[in-house]
Amino acid sequence: MTTLLLSDIHLPNQPSPLHAAFAGFLAGPARQAQTVYILGDLFEYWISDEVGQREYGPEFTALRALTDSGVRVRFMHGNRDFMVGKHFAAATGVELLHDPLPLDLAGVPTLLSHGDIFCTDDIAYQRWRRFSRNPLAQAIYKLLPESVHRRIASTARSGSESKPSVIMDVNEAAVRQAFVQYDVRRIIHGHTHRPAEHAYDIDGRACERIVLADWRPQRLEYLVCDDTGWRRQLFDPAA
């Protein structure tokens, strides 16, 4: 059975060719899969489910059509859309996941993650991540007006864009620890926008880390996993 994985689409709340590309993916390749995993940052930022449904109505509709067709869609929060909540899940039929998620993927013990949990060199971000995921902090956030939500999102986005690239990548010790802690042979994640494959020797076991590509108009890439293994696949909206 085929599983598709993608991350870091970064759909903006304004016109962009990425909107049509994502809709084409949901109506095309995704319909042939058993399960689709979206590993975070589907949206450039997410203020709330209510605002999100207003700004991303076509995406809500397309995801609902896909899940109604029988395809299982599972979503993991990213650093830009960690406020995606139960209303989004109910409206789209998408299942919300914890990060990280260990599972058997096509016969291989695998750990799925957005990837930011491995970027432990960015101490300030990890502090912010713990705070922003706190249920009490989120409850207080929801009481604030939309204008404040937008300022917070803008500040967080500009802050991440100004950081040195070296601390934006994963920490290798954190990755190795995850292989051991979750007893997996493969880790798949996004977040870093550095698509690549990395080989590891973990206690004598051959392991691999696959970094998903971020979406750009000139590179719309997703990962295909099935009984034959895995492969990167480019989506051509014009095909």
Image (cartoon, grey):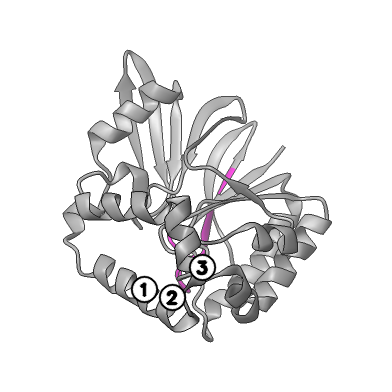
| Residue 74 seen by the camera | yes
In the rendered image, which residue does mark 2 sit on?
149
Residue 95 locus on image (x, y percent)? 67, 49
Position of residue 194 in the picture relative to residue 123 (left or right): right
Point out residue 164 in the picture as x, y percentages from the top left corner.
16, 61
Secondary structure category for the residue under label 1: helix
Tag in front: 2 or 3: 3
Image disc number at residue 102: none
Q: Earlier in the sequence, mark 2 or mark 3?
A: 3
Q: Give the side of residue 139 with respect to residue 107, left or right.
A: left
- Which residue does the image show at 67% across and 62% down from the upper left? 87
The residue beneath circle 3 is 142
Instruction: Give how far across and how far down residue 42 sits, in percent.
Output: 52, 63
Q: Which image quarter: residue 68? A: bottom right
Numbered range of the magenta stretch: 214-224
Q: Are marks 1 and 2 in contact (CB under 8 Å)?
A: yes
Crowding at mark 2 (Cα within 10 Å: few <14, some 14-19, many 20+):
some
Give the residue number, with chain letter if any, for mark 1.
152
The CA span between labels 1 and 3 is 12 Å
Mark 3, residues whose alpha carbon is within 10 Å: few (<14), some, or many (≥20)? few
